Image: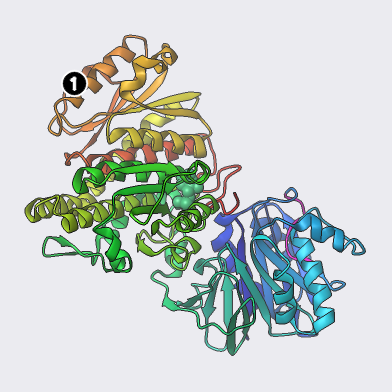
Amino acid sequence: MCGIVGYVGPGSSLEVLMGGLRRLEYRGYDSAGVAVLDDDGELGVRKRAGKLAVLAGELESDGIRDGHTGIGHTRWATHGGPTDGNAHPHLGDDGRLALIHNGIIENFAELKAELADETFTSETDTEIAALLVGRLYRETGDLTEALRRAVARLEGAFTILAMHRDDPGVVVGARRNSPLVIGLGEGENFLGSDVAAFVAYTKRAMEIGQDQIVTIRPDSVEVTDFAGNPVTPTQFEIAWDASAAEKGGWPSFMKKEVSEEPAAVANTLRGRIHDGRVTLPELDAIAEILDGVTRIIVIACGTAAYAGMLGRYAIEAWSRIPIDVELSHEFRYRDPVLDEHTLVVSVSQSGETMDTLRAVQYAREKGARTLAICNTQGATIPRESDAVLYIHAGPEVAVASTKAFVAQVTALYLLGLDLAARRGTLSPERIAELIVELQNVPDKLDDVLDAASSRIAEFTRWLAETQSVIFLGRHVGYPVALEGALKLKEIAYIHAEGFAAGELKHGPIALIEPGQLVIVLVPSPRNDDSLHPKVVSNIQEIRARGARVIAIAEVGDVAVVPFADEVIRIPFAGPFFEPILGVVPLHIFAMEMASAKGLDVDQPRNLAKSVTVE
Ligand code: AGP
């Protein structure tokens, strides 16, 4: 996944491009580059491997002249390693055309053979596109037409921006299975892989649909499909401002976003509850099938999948609809039984995860109806779905997903309550009670943050050398154990594994040796007295074998105290709401462990915020 910015207007291209790339750097940060057409019609290009700061330094020491037409790119390498030569922009038409690309051109080898007489300077698929568009520009003399003919030859997923020195004030773009949005300014216009690219300049945006081409000039925006037919895109107002996309004084985006977990839940609930009832007009688009749904399949990856696993308990308990949760990249290849009574619910923060996008497209082809739960307006997965339930977590910039997780669970709970009301599987009174519990979650999350943050920061200092951590949870605690393990792996680079606590005696307990750190999600003794004693005995079993135990337990639960080295307290909440509280100490734990090891919590190695390749 890469960051993409385009600009035409009276302003400074370099300022717009570098500012936009800074806000997009989480999308990919192994190299970066810009191309700017200066007032003398010279096309200046600078691109460097490494983080954006390396390019910024280059522009300081050996810069290019500014201008009013430009494109910029931050890369997450797919074809060809992170080198200066492989960085974008790539050139065509003997250096008169610059082009940037996000995605994968699957038939680039075939096209490269056709362009054998061209000179290649990189190992990338993108350079093929630049050379192809350059050749077509020489034939047509029209940049939009050249791009249109080029994309007709491309297979795979791509967002492409291009500019040509003979066309000042013009940037063209095309997208297929990859994100691209338009920023509408006054006498200036923008393109970006998401709205963070230009939100500092305008909150008016338009989404570009599948297989569409856009031509921006300072005073015009033209969108057509790949066949050249005019299209009128949907315009929308960006719901957050540039500061929300900045750290705002926090040491890391992740710390800022963990602090926003209460607001993420509150904002996802906002406007969706009236007089003790859930109101989701977003579901009107699929209302006719909701009453007849016989099966739900949640598809997602990573943290989003764990949110789906957690939502599953409540949705099935409340609506009595059988529900499964599957990893998107597995679902699509197992030939699942789907029909018009199957509701496939995708969960994706970015709305651009290619594995999940492909699974959604597959489900629709097989006749299922699809609902997207997503955090990114104008993203591809919502556009490819029959309906979308946006979570309103605000921009999530850190690669590790935190506030989106609690907001995704909240949205799934709203869906479960809506289905229960439609099917009469819960009384209006019971629904009203559950809604009150859900509405109390944000305040309880504030209490967790207040109580846990400093305590966890303290004791992680003596844990920084830990080589492995086991997470245990039961019932709704199990998905939280998986999520806690993932967070620790992805940002602190510590091997971690989540287990269902009941599974210990079936094998994993063999891993317990003196000093092994185990973190246990302890169910409240007030919620289900059959689970609490079982988990406490699990703790005793591992303590007897020398484990060190950190328990996440309800305020007042004294049963765990004799067997835990540390107890992180969370307020009481009903059985389905307790895990939304219990996950936050695990987010904080992973973040503090990564910080104690001096790691970059926002941009962990080998990862990108959204994986837009399969
Ligand atoms: C979560 O911390 C990870 N960065 C990763 O597992 C992520 O949740 C997964 O790639 C799915 O991303 P999405 O929600 O944007 O689809």
Asked whether the viewer can see residue 262, the reply is: no
Q: Identify the element where label 1 is drawn.
A: helix
Estimate the x, y position of residue 525 in percent, counting from the top left.
15, 29
Quadrant of the rendered image containing residue 90: bottom right
Above/below status of 38 relative to 584: below
Front residue (pair 307, 201): 307
Front residue (pair 246, 99): 99
**Residue at the image point whose x is 28% and y is 21% from the top:** 564
Front residue (pair 523, 22): 523
The amino acid marked with disc number 1 is Pro
Above/below status of 558 relative to 481: above
Asked whether the viewer can see residue 533, the reply is: yes
Estimate the x, y position of residue 575 in percent, counting from the top left.
19, 38
Colour scheme of the rendered structure:
rainbow
Estimate the x, y position of residue 601 in percent, counting from the top left.
50, 44
Give neighbour class at mark 1: few <14, some 14-19, many 20+ (Cα, 10 Å): some
**Residue of label 1:** 533
**Residue at the image point whose x is 37% and y is 16% from the top:** 506
| Predominant secondary structure, magenta span | loop
Front residue (pair 524, 272): 272
In this rendering, position of residue 593 left or right of residue 285: right
The region drawn magenta spans: 82-90
* Residue 85: in magenta span: yes
In this rendering, position of residue 582 left or right of residue 133: left
Above/below status of 42 relative to 495: below
Estimate the x, y position of residue 614 in percent, counting from the top left.
59, 49
**Residue at the image point whose x is 25% and y is 60% from the top:** 269
